[in-house]
Image: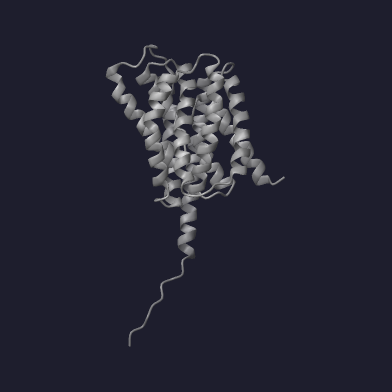
Amino acid sequence: MDVTLVSTLALMSLVGFTLGIFGGGGSILAVPVLVYVAGVTPGSAIGISLAVVGATSLVGSFAHHRRGQVDPRVALLFGGTGMATAYLGARLTHLVSGRVLMFMFALMMMGVGAWMLFDQRRAMAAVDADRPSRRRLVPALLAGAAVGLVTGFLGVGGGFLVVPALIAFAGLEMRKAVGTSLLVIAINSSAGFLGHLSRGPLDFRLVALLTGLAIVGAIVGERAARRVSVLKLRASFAVFVITVGIAVAVSNELQAKAARADRPAAHVVAVT
């Protein structure tokens, strides 16, 4: 079997695992895996990532729902406001060059990784489990819309933003925030995927294969979350995300320099 395909499948199962255990974060690896390992163009990689992450998150949310760790009303509030902006973000993606997209992705990875590493205890802290108050409703709607825009534009689920937002604005405790986050990601990703699909067809055989592996990883991750310290795993994953972000930025810059070096020198015309 092709080494590239095996590597892609293994890494996408890791994406599913992190979605299952953290309620988000793993999708931030999907686009770099598809671009640098599978050789997919950045625009197509974002569309494929949304399909894989959306389907995987939906399956993962069912597993959490069986244990009463999903709040459908809150998920619809966040996901509903994010659907329109996710579709808009997907339409905007194709207006930006692949190099710029990957540079933005690298910056986001490093920022998210740093946030997960240095602010993890506050992010994991539980707050009161009251329903969202009217005072917090507007910030919750704005947070949902912002997450949707990021989801559609860069092809990430946005769980690293959704989980803390659900804790801060919806008053959910950590485990319920993780389960609810997966349903929000599924809603946003479906809208973003439709926006990318309108730009052209994707390789659905590849999508189905990657989704299957990611779902298996999500199921394993959801079960692992019951037995291991999510806080310690989160710190390790944060370091990994930062490292990948730096690698993406360096690789992107090297490719840009190589492209500039390959350009033919401008012709000098002598005027007599």
Whether residue 272 sits left or right of residue 37 in the image: it is left
- Quadrant where the N terminus lies? top right
Q: Is any part of residue 107 visible from this angle?
A: no
Q: Identify which residue is drawn at 52% across, 45% down.
A: 45
Q: For this rendering, which residue is in front, 177 or 267? A: 177
List x then y, in percent, for residue 172.
41, 16
Give the total number of marks visible in the rendering: 0
Whole-percent x and y of residue 185? Answer: 47, 30
User: Is 145 drawn above or below residue 92 in the view shown?
Assistant: above
Give the answer, above or below, for where 65 lies relative to 241.
Answer: above
Query: Which image quadrant for residue 150?
Result: top left
Q: What is the residue that sits farthest to the left in this orientation?
A: 135
268 to 85, vertically: above or below: below
Residue 20 is situated, as x and y percent measured from the top left of the image, at: 55, 25
19 and 261: which one is in front? 19
Q: Is residue 212 left or right of residue 128?
A: right
Image quarter in which the C terminus is found: bottom left
**Which residue is pictured at 67% across the width and 41% down the height?**
6
Query: Between 159 and 48, which is closer to the camera in this rendering?
Result: 48
Residue 97 appears in view: yes
Q: Name the residue located 39 percent from the left edge and 14 percent from the top edge.
A: 127
Q: Position of residue 218 (x, y in %)?
A: 58, 27
What colour scheme does the image use? Answer: one colour
Q: Residue at x 51, y 34 (%)?
A: 27
Residue, far bottom: 272
